[in-house]
Structure formats: structure tokens, C-alpha cells
Amino acid sequence: MGSSPIIGFSIHLGTVAPTDTGSIPPWVSTGHAIPVLVEPKTSGEPYWSGWALAGDSRATAVASHDGVTVLLAGELYHRAELGSVVGETADGLSDAELLLACWLRYGPSGLRLCNGRFAAVVAENDSVVVATDHAGTIPLYLRTRPDGVDVATEAKVLAEGAGDSFPAPGTEPAPGLTGVRRVQAGTAVTLVPGSTVAEAARTWRPPHHRLIVSPDEAVNRVADVLDKAVRTRLGGPHDPVTAVLSGGIDSSSVVALASGGGRPVRTISLGTDIGDEFAAARVVAEHLGTRHHEFRCSSEELVRQLPWAVAAAEIVDAEVLEYLLPLVVLYRMVPNEGTRIVTGYGADIPLGGMHRTTERLHSLDEVIAFDMGTFDGLNELSPVLGSMAGHWTTHPFWDRDVLDLLTALEPGLKRRDGRDKWVLREAMRELLPTATVTRPKLGIHEGSGTSSAWSQLLRRVGVAESDLASVKTAMAAVFHRRTVREQEPPGEVSFDDVLDEVMSEQNLAVTR
Ligand code: AMP
Ligand code: MG
């Protein structure tokens, strides 16, 4: 794991020799461009042409051996274990080389061994496998054409001139785009470029069973697996890291584990004029001795950056955008010190944290099962949220081992003694102040006042309460059309113009 992996790529795999690798549009993630050009060694293999983006110009994107070529964006988190089964020490191998070694031993099943944050393309003979990690944390899109297949980690790259992609198994239509398809989470799709031959294999599914373990054992297991997920994400014990800290139990846990052993941690918190969690974050920062920074953004300024959130997440769901907006804004405000960013995002899904007042264990477990069955395609963990501002982000709570354990624990360990996320709070009791361990959950959109910020701005221009939701939904669709389908740089999309367009479409009057 380097401190800055391959951020993303756009690749054409075709039957015709390419003339060049194409240019990188200005509206994708920022990074160093690495041209990718691979000639077939024997007839039948595809030509590769395109580019990868990396934080470091010396990064390698592609690994090749024995007729197998691997392109990997992202990173693997259990390198030592993988090394032990492929008969090599992982030291000195890039993640692409490690995946290649795994493939050479196990074939496509090797993808089932990988715990990481990655999107991969592997070519062997005339077929190509495109694969996401267990949770699809790096979104992966494809477009099939008569002369090959285009694969990219940002849908906007494929939007132009997209015709009809055939509905390959293991893929779904990307929202708002015809002819672009998204590879599902935990899925490997095998394609033959230029044909409609395709099949899909699952590499992971959220567990449906529940484990009965003693409360003590559950607490110990959660502490261990989370500690490992944090450590394997952060490089050497003295490599500095940045953490987005709200002062809630999830982000505070990550900061506590990251700073154990003396690692220098910079913590950052966002607030608006409507709300902040600064006091709670400060308690944690002081307790753990982090270098702490507070960023304040007016709620109006925050909402006006919605085009950036849409361009990054490439989704049209207004509610999810409200969760992601504060992070996108914070990433854009934070000076880039070359450290990776770690977050507490996603803990609530396997632990049922959003359902903080649910008393019935059956109901709690049902919402956990529902949320674990419906996360795919929301792109909440997309690296583009950070990489648009040049940051690499990673999420220990969605480590495959952490997610497996947290999801599978029986719900009585999640809701216990009248508390939500009980098992996590207990696991962190020794590392954090009591006030933090017992602090009730506050969603990011609540703490920073995002939902109310968007609503407030709409109310101010005369949108009735009953129209708020439909105006937000319509605005999200227009932001998506302009920044993703029409590839306008998000900085050039005016919030007010989009609002005017939506209001007139819905026959509503704007009062400014
Ligand atoms: P939440 O929706 O509160 O679970 O937030 C998800 C993650 O986003 C947290 O675990 C933090 O890492 C981060 N986060 C939430 N709110 C803030 C904030 N106000 N400032 C900085 N980071 C935050
Ligand atoms: Mg929170």
C-alpha cells in the first residue's frame, strides 16, 4: 500500500490497434496521468489504451505476467495474508502485482480472496474481467461497443456518445445515462470485447445469518478487527494521517485507533452557521492529542457546492447527496498535506445506528438487513468525493472483515442497555472519554445543518414545504445532467440557474 494509490482509470479494451491513449478531461479527479497502452502478445488478446490517475507520477497501474494483465485502482488491505497464500512476500510488490500473483494461482476466484478498496480489470486470452471490491467502494462503469469495451471509474468519462450497451449480467444502468452500466458491488463480470458474451460471478454478499457470541467476546472481536482495519489502512506506524472527526462514536473510534502508538493525526471538523459539533470533536481531539482544525462554511456556501457533490458521487438521490455534501465541502477546504484521509463513515449501516430509538430487536435487524441489501449504487464511499480535491480517502468500517462481523452480530449486541451501537461503544470504552462513548448519534447532515441548509435556501425563494422534496429531486437531476452527462465542470454550474430552471419547470414562482 503506497500512501497514494491509483485513483481511477479510463480504459478501452478493443480488437483494433489504438492510435493513442486519449486525453484526460479536466473535469475528473485530479492527479498525475499515467498512460496505459498494452499490445496483445498473441492474437485474440485485446489491445488496451487509456489512462490511469495517481497521486504520484511514479505509480504503476498495470502488472503483467504469463499472458495475464492487471490494472488496479485503489488498494488491498491484507497484503501479508495474500502474500502468504500466493507464495511470495508481499513486500515490494505493488497491489496490482499482488492481485496478479493471486490470479495466477487461483484464477478469477482469486478476487474472492481480496479485502480492499479497489476496481480492477484483468485480461487473459480473449476475455476481460472487470471487478469491484466487496462493497463496490470504487464505482466501476462500462460501455460495450462493437469494437470493444470501455471501462472507467467515473461514469462521466463514458457519457459522451454512449449508444446501447448490452445488459451484461452483474451490471445495472448508471442513473441518468443511456448506454453506461455500473458493475455491481462484490461482482466480477467476464466479457469478450466486441461481443455480447458475458457472465457474472459474485465475490461477496452481505451476511444474512447472525452470530451468537458472548457480549465480552463480541466486544473484543470488534475492537480487534477494527484496530486491524485502521492499521492496515494507514501505512507505517509513524505515517501521518488526516481524520474527519465529528466527535461521534464512529469517527472518534477511528481517530483513537489511528493515534494509538504515537502516529501524528490531524483531525478536521466542519460546521456551518446553522450547526456544528465542534465542542464534541474538541473533547476527542484534546483527549487523544491530535492536531485539530475547525472549518466553518456558511450554510449557503455549502449548498451552492452541490454540483461538486453530484459530479463526484454521480448519483441523483437528493437524500444521499445531503449526507455527502458536507464531506465534499470539507475535502475541498482542507489543505492537502499529502496524507490520506480516514473517516468513520458507514458504521451505522451494519450497526443500525440511524435507528437509534428502535427498541424491537426484530425491527432493528430488519432495517440492518434492508440497508445492507440496498447500499449498492449509492456511491457513498466513492473515492471521487475526495479525489476531486486531490485527497485519497478510506473507510475502516467498510473493511470486509469489519463489515462481515458487524453485520453478523446478533442485534441484541447492537441495541443493549438502552443504547445504540452498544458493542462499538463498549469496544472503545478505554480509549475515549466517557462523554464520547455515551454521546447519542447525530447524522452528518444534522450536525452540520445540511438538510436544513438546502431546505432553508429553498424556503427563502418561496418554495412551499410540500414542494421541498420534489424541488430537491429535480435539482439533483439537473446537476447530474450537467456535470455527468454533459461533463460541465461543477464550478461552472450555477446553483441559482438550476433552481430557476427547476422552478419554472414545476410552475413555481421564485421570489428573490
Ligand atoms: P455520520 O453521518 O455522523 O455518521 O458521519 C459519517 C462520518 O463523516 C463520521 O464518522 C465522520 O468521519 C464524518 N463527519 C460527520 N460529521 C462531520 C463533521 N461535522 N465534521 C467532520 N467530519 C464529520
Ligand atoms: Mg455524526
Image (cartoon, rainbow, N blue to C red):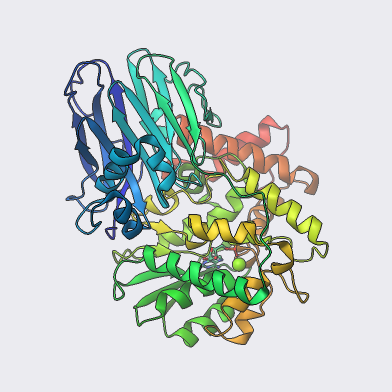
As drawn, 477 above or below 231 = above
Q: Residue at x 69, y 74 (%)?
A: 440
Residue 18 image position (x, y, % from top left)? 20, 21
Residue 335 image position (x, y, % from top left)? 34, 65
Q: Which corner quadrant of the image does residue 53 belong to?
A: top left
Q: 493 or 353: which is nearer to us?
A: 353
Q: Is residue 494 visible?
A: yes
As drawn, 63 above or below 254 = above
Q: Quadrant of the N terminus?
A: bottom left
Q: 416 or 286: which is nearer to us?
A: 416
Residue 331 image position (x, y, % from top left)? 43, 60
Q: Along the horizontal axis of the image, is 467 left or right of 140?
A: right
Residue 374 image position (x, y, % from top left)? 64, 43
Q: Which corner quadrant of the image does residue 109 belong to?
A: top left
Q: Residue at x 35, y 49 (%)?
A: 74
Quarter of the rendered structure image containing ligand 2: bottom right
Q: 302 or 384: which is nearer to us?
A: 384
Q: Along the horizontal axis of the image, is 28 left or right of 355?
A: left
Q: Which corner quadrant of the image does residue 441 belong to?
A: bottom right
Q: Residue at x 38, y 42 (%)?
A: 110
Q: How many marks?
A: 0
Q: Is residue 460 visible?
A: no
Q: Residue at x 60, y 61 (%)?
A: 406
Q: Along the horizontal axis of the image, is 37 left or right of 174?
A: left
